[in-house]
Image (tube, rainbow, N blue to C red):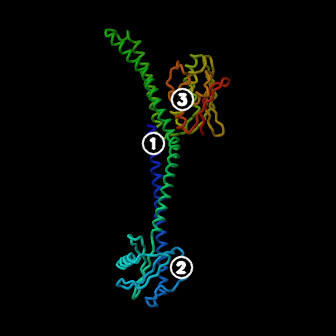
Amino acid sequence: MIKRLRKNIILVNILLVGTVILLIFAAVCINSYSSAKTELERSMNMIAERSLDDYKRPPEKFGEKKHDNQPSQLNSYITVAVDYEGNILSRQESNATIDEDILSNSVSEAISSDKQVGEIGEYNLTYVKNEQIDRIIIVFADNSSVYSTLRNTILVCLGLFLASMAVIFLISLALSGIAVNPVKDAWNKQKQFVADASHELKTPLTVILANNNIMMSHKDSKVEDEIKWLQSTEDEAQHMKKLIDQMLFLAKSDAENSKTELTKVNVSEIIEASSLNFEPIAFEKGILLDCEIEPDIIADSNATMLNQLSHILIDNAVKYSASSGIVKIKLLSRNDKLIFSVNNYGNVISKEELAHIFDRFYRAEKSRTTKGYGLGLSIAQNITNCIGGKISVESSEDKGTTFSVEWNI
């Protein structure tokens, strides 16, 4: 998929940029041809207009007068004066020679044409007619230089086009790698998410199916005789429900279909209530909850999400705290900033693990002896983003592990 996406990006870039460059070069070629043709016709018109000076002289004397300031753009041409029956009265050649038959045929074609300026393709000639009362003055010039200029321009543009396509390909190849990196990461995370979710769901499903098989094999047993298997099934089903709820929450957050509604809430009361809920659990593990919560801090937030956030962080701290340890819960306001932090002492999280601590299904405890799915901290990060805050984590031997959430009051 990633390779195909990268190929498509390169192909689209080459097609789009190549089309633009091709259009530019086509415009250059057309402009070059048009300019050369216009310049040739302009020079020929100047010669034809100057020939009007010969008009008052007898036809047989036409072309005898030499003119100064001849157009430098055109040095090779032939000027002829003919009557309206096509008879050549006189001719003047300037650095050019032409066969009599070719000249006669060219004159006939020029006279028969309705155009004042035209081309005789058979002989590569361009003509300009200047009609007078008793004669027609025609200027002939070789137009092969115009097409030679066009051909050279096309060859140069073609070479530049091929060179530019090679450069565009190399640039597209490099940029496509950069462009698909986020997609590649997302794709890998998605595959990992599916694999981890399947693994987490497989375990409770296996237990539930095993319990059902056991109970089905005891068809004559009473409910109270199978209570152990029923309770195990209930526990695993609740674990599955919790996992599915967490995955649905993350999927909804990823979809970003709706904005989180923020209202004025008493953050102090929410954090304090969450702390009280964990006191029995902490007491059973011999853990002391040390709370430092400033009273009546009001901030824009979402009460439900904030309660879930505090529950995740405190539960995580209690779960991974050392026995007879202390979990410090702080809520402070500093310079229009609200800081909520939870600190505990347990296994130090390494720098490598800290980089992935908020990844889905990631657990720093490789043995997975503690129950959990590795989605809690990912949900905490999503909640923090929804309420416009920022979550961070630090871990060291002397200061323990601290999760901090900071947002504007």
Q: CA distance from mark 2 to mark 1?
A: 60 Å
Q: Residues within 10 Å of mark 2 (few under 14, many from 20)?
A: few
Assign a secondary structure to mark 3: helix
Q: Residues within 10 Å of mark 3 (few under 14, many from 20)?
A: many
* Picture layout, residue 46 above or below residue 336: below
Residue sitting nearer the eye, 229 or 88:
88
* Picture layout, residue 349 above or below residue 48: above
Amino acid type, callout 3: Leu
Q: CA distance from mark 3 to mark 2?
A: 88 Å
Residue carrying label 3: 377
User: What residue lies at 59% left-to-right and 28% top-to-bottom?
Assistant: 352
Q: Earlier in the sequence, mark 2 or mark 1?
A: 1
Spot occupied by residue 13 in the image (x, y as percentages of width and height): 47, 48
User: What residue lies at 58% left-to-right and 17% top-to-bottom?
Assistant: 283
Spot occupied by residue 270 in the image (x, y as percentages of width and height): 56, 31
Residue sitting nearer the eye, 402 or 101:
101
Residue carrying label 1: 7
Q: Is residue 136 left or right of residue 36?
A: left
Residue sitting nearer the eye, 202 or 254:
202
Amino acid type, callout 1: Lys
* Picture layout, residue 171 above or below residue 317: below
Q: CA distance from mark 1 to mark 3?
A: 37 Å
Spot occupied by residue 313 in the image (x, y as percentages of width and height): 56, 27
Residue carrying label 2: 70
User: What residue lies at 45% left-to-right and 46% top-to-bottom?
Assistant: 11
Q: Which mark is residue 320?
A: none
Amino acid type, callout 2: Gln
Spot occupied by residue 251 in the image (x, y as percentages of width and height): 45, 34
User: What residue lies at 55% left-to-right and 35% top-to-bottom?
Assistant: 384
State the count of labels.
3
Assign a secondary structure to mark 1: helix
